[in-house]
Amino acid sequence: MKKFLYIFLSYFVASNAFANQPKDWQLGFQEAASSTMRDIVNFHDKLLLPIIIAISVFVLFLMIYACIRFRASANPVPSKRTHNVAVEVLWTLIPCLILIVMAVPSFKILYSQDTIPKADVTVKAIGYQWYWGYEYPDENIIFDSYMIEDKDLKANQPRLLAVDNEVVVPVNKVIKVLITANDVLHAWALPSFGVKRDAVPGRINETWFKAEKVGTYYGQCSELCGIKHAFMPITVRVVSEEDYQEWLTGAKIKFAKEIIEEDQFKKLASK
Ligand SMILES: [Cu+2]
């Protein structure tokens, strides 16, 4: 009983916390932190779910009705009827109309995801077997982002989701994400922002998000990419503009592209 109470309470407490990640006993989506995700959640909760429930209940009713009404004992002489034009027209037309009703808001969301507003910050995510590499092309920053092993986890770090080098972005700014891969297909996905794009070798996919709340957001590679597919999480830390500038100053030194590339060349040359 105590355990259930704890889970029940933690569900509500956690929804106010600063980290968005999957929760125990979770039903439905993670809390939305961008307008795109809010649209997706509304589309699902207010349109798709009622339609799905109505169809399931209707089909269940028809099955029960047919089982009772047309049972063998009540129908010693079975009906020979095979066609009914009115019913056939209806069961073709009504599903078509339902699909059209669903398609309109669905396409609206798809197009809004596809039209990238003027970007404030550009981040390039590169999928590797099995970690993510990041670049801030405008800032000359480049770094790798590895999952933290169980034994090295700190108290507030979620297992299988925390990484050593997080992507840091400012709050309420348009972040453009360029997504590609170096070896096989991966996918860069962040549920709270409503972002999921395939990372394809030799090709750059684009998407964007605008995080509305300061906090840490977790995602995972969402394309089966090999034996350690489950161990290449994505962590995005959304911070205030001042904190972002501060991080940038440090990161430009720590993750400076030229120095890192020079080091790599030296290592290669010495081999
Ligand atoms: Cu992957």
Image (cartoon, rainbow, N blue to C red):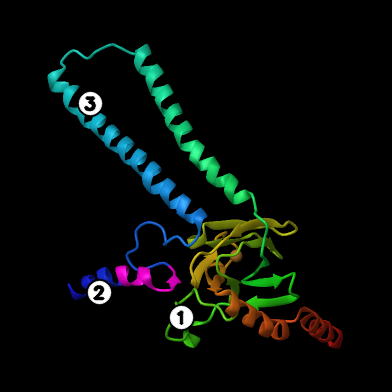
Tag 3: residue type? Ala
Crowding around mark 3 (Cα neighbors within 10 Å: few <14, some 14 to 19, many 20+) is few
- How far across and how far down the image is residue 261, in percent? 80, 80
Crowding around mark 2 (Cα neighbors within 10 Å: few <14, some 14 to 19, many 20+) is few
Q: Residue furthest front?
A: 242
Alpha carbon distance from label 3 to label 2: 45 Å
Crowding around mark 1 (Cα neighbors within 10 Å: few <14, some 14 to 19, many 20+) is some
222, above or below 261, in the image: above
| Residue identified by numbered label 1 | 157
- How far across and how far down the image is residue 207, in percent? 63, 56
| Residue identified by numbered label 3 | 66
Quadrant location of the C terminus in the rendered image: bottom right
Which element carries disc 1, helix, strand or loop? Answer: loop
148, above or below 114, in the image: below
Q: Which residues are magenta?
A: 11-21
Quadrant of res 78: top left
Which element carries disc 3, helix, strand or loop? Answer: helix
- How far across and how far down the image is residue 59, in percent? 29, 33
Q: Earlier in the sequence, mark 2 or mark 1?
A: 2
- Write the residue at 61% across / 61% down: 174
Label ID, residue 6: 2
Q: Earlier in the sequence, mark 3 or mark 2?
A: 2
* Viewer-closest of 119 and 196: 119
Is residue 255 visible in the rendered image? The answer is yes
Alpha carbon distance from label 2 to label 1: 20 Å
Quadrant location of the N terminus in the rendered image: bottom left
208, above or below 239, in the image: above
Tag 2: residue type? Tyr
- Write the residue at 72% across / 59% down: 201
